Image (spheres, rainbow, N blue to C red):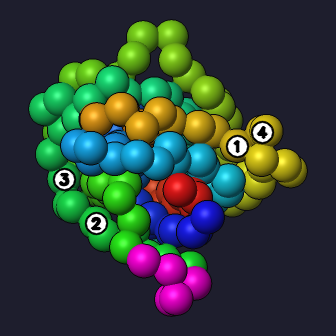
């Protein structure tokens, strides 16, 4: 299996979830994606008052009305072929197809922190099916932190 990396940022973070990175399967894809590592943080000076950023990873059943920057996932090993998974980063419009009650991970963290989550074994990876448009979305929200959030996804297919 090949491993890939997708970086995402959102500026500004708002009091509604904003997508940093989205992964979804292409039409006719025969591979499932498995997220094995997530890194979260900020890329701006902190607010004058300590505040929080809330993160989640949820399932999507299609890209819906999502708009942002299309990104070609970077192969971690340059000998691996191109990914069949589609990536969207720095969303300007949120997907209308985030599956209700499908939150797979949920973190709350201080704006001054960073966080790294790693699946300890393959059975703990966050899997999305090889169904067209299905995937995962990494999102951030805060009612008081309004600068730049950074979230990255490492996945295999």
Q: Are marks 2 and 1 in contact (CB under 8 Å)?
A: no
Point out which mark residue 125 bears: 1
Nearer the N terminus, badge 2 or badge 4? 2
How far apart are the two marked residues, 4 and 1, measured between alpha carbons? 4 Å
Q: Give the CA separation, mark 3 to mark 4.
A: 29 Å
Foreground: disc 2 or disc 4: 4
Give the Cα distance between marks 2 and 4: 26 Å
The answer to whether residue 95 is seen in the rendering is no
Q: Is residue 41 left or right of residue 30?
A: right
Residue tagged 3? 68
Whether tag 4 and tag 1 are in contact, CB under 8 A, the answer is yes
Is 18 positioned to the left or the right of 125 in the image? left
Name which of mark 1 and mark 3 comes first in the sequence. Answer: 3
Q: In the rendered structure, are the residues bearing label 2 and label 4 in contact, judged by CB atoms less than 8 Å apart?
A: no
Identify the disc placed on residue 71. 2
Q: Is residue 91 magenta?
A: no
Name above or below for residue 80 compared with residue 78. Answer: above
Name the N-terminal-most of marks 2 and 1: 2
Magenta span covers which residues? 77-81
Determine which of the numbered discs, if any, sits on residue 124 in the image.
4
Q: State the image coordinates of residue 11 (x, y, percent, origin top left).
A: 31, 56
Within 10 Å of disc 1 (Cα), the crowding (few <14, some 14-19, many 20+) is some
């Amino acid at each position: 299996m090949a491993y890939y990396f997708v970086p995402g940022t959102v500026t500004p973070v708002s009091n509604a979830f904003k997508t940093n990175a989205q992964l979804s399967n292409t039409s006719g894809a025969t591979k499932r994606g498995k997220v094995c590592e997530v890194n979260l943080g900020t890329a701006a000076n902190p607010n004058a008052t300590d505040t929080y950023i809330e993160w989640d990873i949820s399932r999507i059943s299609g890209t819906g009305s999502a708009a942002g920057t299309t990104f070609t996932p970077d192969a971690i090993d340059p000998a691996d072929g191109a990914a069949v998974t589609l990536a969207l980063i720095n969303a300007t419009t949120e997907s209308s197809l985030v599956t209700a009650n499908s939150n797979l991970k949920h973190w709350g963290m201080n704006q001054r922190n960073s966080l790294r989550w790693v699946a300890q074994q393959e059975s703990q990876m966050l899997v999305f099916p090889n169904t067209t448009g299905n995937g995962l979305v990494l999102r951030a929200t805060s009612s008081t932190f309004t600068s730049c959030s950074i979230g990255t996804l490492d996945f295999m297919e």
